[in-house]
Amino acid sequence: MAKKLIVGNWKMHTSVAEAELLAERLTGQIKPKDGVEVVLCPPAISLSTVKSLIEGKFSLGIQNVYQVDEGAYTGEVSAEMVRGLVDYAIVGHSERRIHFGERDGMIAHKVAACLRHDIAPILCVGEKIADRVEGHAKRVIGDQLAVDLGGVTPDEIERVVIAYEPVWAIGTGEFAKPHDVEVMVRYIRAAIKEAYSAAAGKNIKLLYGGSVDPDNARSYLEVDGVDGLLVGGASINYAKFASIVDKAG
Ligand code: PGA
């Protein structure tokens, strides 16, 4: 069976010293399990520090990358710069889309930059509450996938991880019903199958994210077609994150 992927997105939390402490706590608390891959995504300034503490135990991810390899882009970090440092990069997170105006065309370039530099993109897609209420959730996800994966070849598609994260469930404590997650995950797999192949639709890793906590983690992990979780708020609490990882193994 494919490994479950549990990703912790620390967002804009933790100083370097706090990140170090959290990584130490997590390595102490989480026992490695064959069937689970844990990915920590600390703030970019703490990547090297955290990597030195988790090497060989957890994987490392960056929360965002810029799509151009180098140049006059003050403040940005490119995929090329973190090549060899990180295993994964979160791309197209709804907070990037909402607060930083990232659009699907740009996100497609970010996905391509990750693949070019041997980093597995964790592509986030998700509908807003209005889309869901108006019955457009699938169309919104389908449109995001079509553009965001527009440059991904059949050889590359299985290196992409897709996180289904309904925007209204992120950081809100609002839970998506496992049945609704199942419907969307099935839709995403069908879209990948249609665009690529039956094998890609089956093999691509799909995560669920949005207010995941130790109490609801298992209900999402049990959803058919869900290969893991993208955890925000609960991932900076070492006891909660360890408990979520425990449910995956
Ligand atoms: P949350 O965040 O778990 O705090 O809802 C999820 C995410 O942003 O990926």
Image (cartoon, helix red, strand yellow):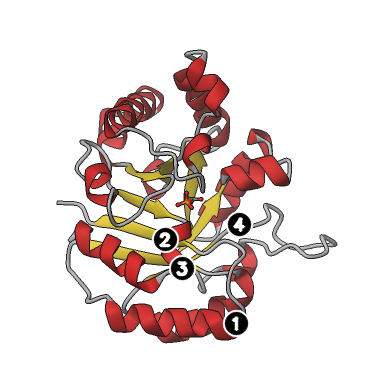
Q: Which residue is the site of mark 1?
A: 16
Q: Quadrant of the C terminus?
A: bottom left
Q: Secondary structure at mark 4?
A: loop
**Residue 14 in view:** yes
Mark 3 surroundings: few (<14), some (14-19) or many (≥20) residues within 10 A: many
In percent of width and height, residue 208 lies at 37, 43
How many numbered marks appear?
4
In percent of width and height, residue 221 lies at 24, 46
Please report the residue visible at 44 percent of the width from the left and 45 percent of the height from the top: 210
Quarter of the figure with residue 13: bottom right
Please report the residue visible at 85 percent of the width from the left and 62 percent of the height from the top: 72
| N-term-proximal mark, 4 vs 1 | 1
Mark 1 to mark 2: distance in Å? 19 Å
Mark 1 surroundings: few (<14), some (14-19) or many (≥20) residues within 10 A: some
- Nearer mark to the viewer, of 3 and 1: 3
Q: Is mark 2 within 8 Å of ligand 1?
A: yes
Q: Which residue is the site of mark 4?
A: 64
> Which residue type does callout 4 highlight?
Asn
| N-term-proximal mark, 3 vs 1 | 1
Q: Which residue is the site of mark 2?
A: 234
Answer above or below: position of 7 versus 188. below
Please report the residue visible at 45 percent of the width from the left and 20 percent of the height from the top: 138
- Nearer mark to the viewer, of 4 and 1: 1
Mark 2 to mark 3: distance in Å? 6 Å
